[in-house]
Amino acid sequence: MEAIKKTFKITAEAAKGSLVFEAEEGRRLVLALEDNGVDILHRCGGNAKCTTCRVEVLAGDPGEIGEPERAILATKTDLGERTRLSCQVRLIDDLHVQVIRQASVEGIDAGGRPTE
Ligand code: FES
């Protein structure tokens, strides 16, 4: 029997307004967003290289930041302190995030789907 995973409440501010959904513990935030109807960009396929999957964390704990994510974010000067790459965030808490870049808004392909 599979263990029942904990779920968290995710609130996302996106182009079409505010969206609330549940997502499983440990899931990549970028996939949780995409699977719940937010066409967030992830141009490098979830490899901490493009930063198009970035979100602003408005509330909640996005977890520790890893070195690849810290390094790429440090190359950008126009980002807020609470900016994180949603492809690098694995859910450990309820989160409220502002989605920054979406395929439908920018008219470009979202990019290859990141792996689970
Ligand atoms: S940095 Fe490219 S998808 Fe996250």
Image (spheres, rainbow, N blue to C red):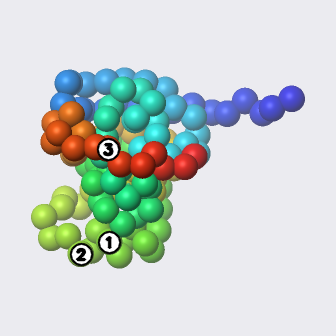
Q: Residue at image x 72%, y 30%?
A: 4
Cα distance, mark 1 to mark 3?
Answer: 19 Å
Note whether residue 108 is visible. Answer: yes
Farthest residue to the right: give it.
Answer: 1
Q: Please identify the quarter of the rendering in which residue 72 is found.
A: bottom left
Cα distance, mark 3 to mark 2?
Answer: 22 Å
Residue type beneath disc 3: Ala
Image-based side of 87 in relation to 107, left or right: right
Q: Which residue is mark 1?
A: 72
The image shows a total of numbered marks equal to 3
Q: Position of residue 83 (x, y in %)?
A: 27, 56
Pointer 3 and pointer 2: residues touching (CB < 8 Å)? no
Residue type beneath disc 1: Ile
Q: Which residue is mark 3?
A: 110
Vertically, is 15 above or below 97? above
Q: Residue at image x 21%, y 34%?
A: 104
Q: Residue at image x 40%, y 64%?
A: 48
Image-based side of 60 in relation to 92, left or right: left
Cα distance, mark 2 to mark 1?
Answer: 5 Å
Vertically, is 73 above or below 45? below
